[in-house]
Each structure stands twice: as structure tokens, then as C-alpha cells.
Image: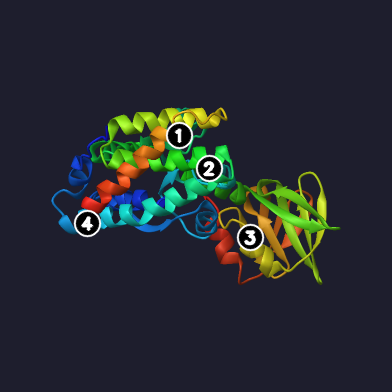
């Protein structure tokens, strides 16, 4: 697990650094003497585990956790057991260690961290899954959410694209190329230079056209083989 | 009576690595005067909540030196400070002097 230490006391950082170096499951990426610098780092770097001192001036360990959108796993470091009670309010905190840190207790906390599923990854996956299901389009300075599954077809119209969905239709200032990049491949297919269709919405196919809802969409010769490949033909 | 120090924690941590043990002692020697200075500054300006933070931090060093009774006194002093009370100030400052003397010898 890639780890960092955040503690304003050099003595504590050195001790934790030594314990990390002796634990084969951990690697120390870097250390910070204050929470602000650590937040800047965490906003641009992926870390599995933070050894975090609660009691730091100006910005406490708990302040830091609250600031992070997707905090990694945290092992709290404290000189006061009473502070550790607050730890149960945070899902990312897997354990707490009381100073002075005993090596055996340190390794137990690391084992606990190893066994705990990463919240960070699961929330990122959820976020990714959401992105896989929907698209936001800018219409009259409003960002409107469109679920991919509701889209029937997309038609190029000059500098605009026309998105036809089950509920509404939208005219958006964009290009076919740009929207093609955003659409999931398993659901959408470009069948003509001016048309992308949701293959799940096809009613029937004739030689050079596809029927979606009441719309007859032309299929270009070059795109036809890919369309046929997608069909579960009997 | 001054409490005697015990470096067994540092030895356990160093696991026979004398270089690392010396490094930790050097950090103690460097950090302790800075923390004492900050403590004294806050005492003079009567900022008791900040003094409590200083004592909280110093407790770690007290425990590293194996000064168990001194640690208890420091913990009680920290509690007093949080209640705007300076009881145990003299005893705590005696502990600080003792720590400085210990670090001169190790």
C-alpha cells in the first residue's frame, strides 16, 4: 500500500517512517508536517493509506478528512485515546494508534487496513458507472442530463447535433465526432456520416435503412457490415 | 525527586540499528528546545489553549523517554489547562528541566 505520513512532529514522522520501512506491505511515498500541503498533494496523487496525526495546529486530522472528497484509508495517530472516539464517525478510518506507537500494534493496524475494502475505489467505480450511464449537454447555459439508454438516435445538422430521446429531443451545439467519443460502444453505432443510432432501439432493417420508432435512417454501405455484425442473427 | 528515564522504547523501535537510534535521539535533542520555547512563549502570553496543545505534543517525548509518572502529571496538567487552570505548572516545568538534563547525558 502506498502510504504517506502527516504529522507536525518530526519525531513521530521518523518513528512511523521506520515502522513503514520494516513492513513489507507498505511503501512510504512522502511525509508532511502540515495538513494543507498534504491536501494539495492528495488532490493530485493516489494514495492507499494515510498515517494521520489528529492533533495538529490550525488544521487537524479530522479537518483534513472532511476536506477530501474521496479520502483513502486512514490510520489515526494520537496521544490521547479520547480523540479516537471521534474516529468512528468516519468510514475511511480503519484504526487508531496511540503515541508512543508500539511496533506490534502498528503492524496489527496495517493488517486491518489491508483487509478493509477501499472506499476510494468503490466510490470512484460508482462515479465511473454513472458516467457510463449518462451524458450532460449544454443547452442555453444549462447542463441537461440525458441517460444514454433513453437516446434513440443522433443526427448531424450543420454545426449542431439533434438528439432524439424517448422523452424529449435536444438540439446541441456540437459535432458528431465529439459525441461519438462520449457514447458507449456497446449501445451506439454510427451507421451513416450524419446518423448514430442506439442499436437497442432498432425495430427492423431493410437493405439500406433502419427503422427506429417512426424514423427511417439511412445506412451507408461502409457502415453496414459493422451493423450486421452487431445483430443476433438467426 | 526526578524520575529516571528508560530508553527501552527507542531500543525496541531501533531493533539493534544504532544509527537509527542515534537519529531519533538527535531529533529529540533538536525538537525539545523548540517545543519548550513555544510552551514558554504561550505561558507568558497566557494563551492557555495553546499551552495545552504544547503540553499535548510534549507528552509524546515524555513517553519516548520512558518517564511514566511524568506522563501522568503532563496529562493532568493538560486537562487543567483546558479548564483555564494552571495547577501542576511547577511540576510540569520540573519535568521539562529533567528531560533537558537527560538529553544532555544520552
At x 47%, y 43%, the residue is B54
At x 35%, y 38%, the residue is B95
Give residue A222's quadrant in the image.
bottom right
Q: Label 3: how many residues lie within 10 Å, few (<14), some (14-19) or many (20+)?
A: few
Q: Is residue B15 left or right of residue B36?
A: left
Residue A90 position, x and y percent, is 51, 34
Pointer 1 with pointer 3, Cβ within 8 A: no
Q: Provide the chain ID for the residue under circle 2.
A: B
Above-or-below relation of B94 to A28: above
Give residue A190's quadrant in the image.
bottom right
Secondary-structure class at tag 3: helix
At x 40%, y 36%, the residue is B92
Q: Provide the chain ID for the residue under circle 4.
A: B
Pointer 1 with pointer 2, Cβ within 8 A: yes
> Which residue is label 3 attached to?
A182
> Which residue is label 1 attached to?
B89
Q: Are marks 1 and 3 on the same chain?
A: no
Q: Label 2: how many residues lie within 10 Å, few (<14), some (14-19) or many (20+)?
A: some
> Which residue is label 2 attached to?
B43
Residue B22 shows which numbered tag?
4
Residue B75 shows which numbered tag?
none
Q: Are marks 2 and 4 on the same chain?
A: yes
Residue A74 position, x and y percent, is 43, 42
Marked residue nearer the N-terminal end (2 or 4): 4
Above-or-below relation of A124 to B1: below
How far apart are labels 2 and 4 at the CA level?
31 Å
Q: Provide the chain ID for the residue under circle 3.
A: A
Marked residue nearer the N-terminal end (1 or 4): 4
Q: Are marks 1 and 2 on the same chain?
A: yes
Secondary-structure class at tag 4: helix
Amino acid at each position: 500500500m502506498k502510504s504517506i505520513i502527516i504529522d507536525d512532529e518530526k519525531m513521530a514522522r521518523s518513528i512511523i517512517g521506520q515502522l513503514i520501512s520494516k513492513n513489507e506491505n507498505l511503501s512510504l511515498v512522502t511525509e508532511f508536517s502540515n495538513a494543507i500541503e498534504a491536501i494539495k498533494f492528495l488532490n493530485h496523487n493516489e494514495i492507499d493509506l494515510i498515517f494521520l496525526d489528529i492533533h495538529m495546529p490550525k488544521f487537524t486530522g479530522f479537518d483534513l478528512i472532511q476536506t477530501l472528497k474521496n479520502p483513502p484509508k486512514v490510520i489515526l495517530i494520537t496521544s490521547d485515546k479520547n480523540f479516537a472516539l471521534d474516529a468512528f464517525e468516519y468510514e475511511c478510518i480503519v484504526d487508531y494508534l496511540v503515541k508512543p506507537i508500539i511496533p506490534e500494534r502498528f503492524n496489527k493496524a496495517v493488517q486491518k487496513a489491508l483487509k478493509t475494502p477501499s472506499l476510494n475505489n468503490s466510490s470512484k467505480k460508482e462515479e465511473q458507472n454513472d458516467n457510463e450511464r449518462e451524458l450532460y449537454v449544454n443547452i442555453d447555459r444549462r447542463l441537461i442530463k440525458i441517460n444514454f439508454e433513453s437516446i434513440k438516435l443522433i443526427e448531424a445538422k450543420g454545426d449542431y447535433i439533434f438528439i432524439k430521446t424517448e422523452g424529449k429531443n435536444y438540439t446541441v451545439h456540437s459535432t458528431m465526432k465529439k459525441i461519438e467519443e462520449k457514447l458507449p460502444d456497446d449501445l451506439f453505432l454510427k451507421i451513416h456520416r450524419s446518423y448514430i443510432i442506439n442499436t437497442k432501439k432498432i425495430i427492423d432493417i431493410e437493405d439500406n435503412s433502419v427503422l427506429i420508432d417512426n424514423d427511417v435512417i439511412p445506412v451507408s454501405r461502409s457502415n453496414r457490415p459493422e451493423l450486421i455484425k452487431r445483430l443476433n442473427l438467426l | 525527586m526526578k524520575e529516571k528515564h528508560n530508553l527501552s522504547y527507542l531500543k525496541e523501535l531501533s531493533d539493534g540499528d544504532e544509527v537509527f537510534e542515534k537519529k531519533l535521539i538527535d531529533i529529540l535533542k533538536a525538537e525539545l528546545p523548540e517545543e519548550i520555547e513555544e510552551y514558554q512563549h504561550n505561558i507568558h502570553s497566557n494563551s492557555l489553549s495553546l499551552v495545552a496543545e504544547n503540553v499535548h505534543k510534549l507528552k509524546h517525548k515524555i513517553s519516548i523517554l520512558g518517564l511514566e509518572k511524568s506522563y501522568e502529571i503532563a496529562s493532568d496538567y493538560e486537562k487543567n489547562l483546558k479548564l483555564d487552570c494552571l495547577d501542576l505548572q511547577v511540576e510540569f516545568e520540573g519535568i521539562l528541566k529533567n528531560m533537558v538534563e537527560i538529553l544532555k547525558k544520552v
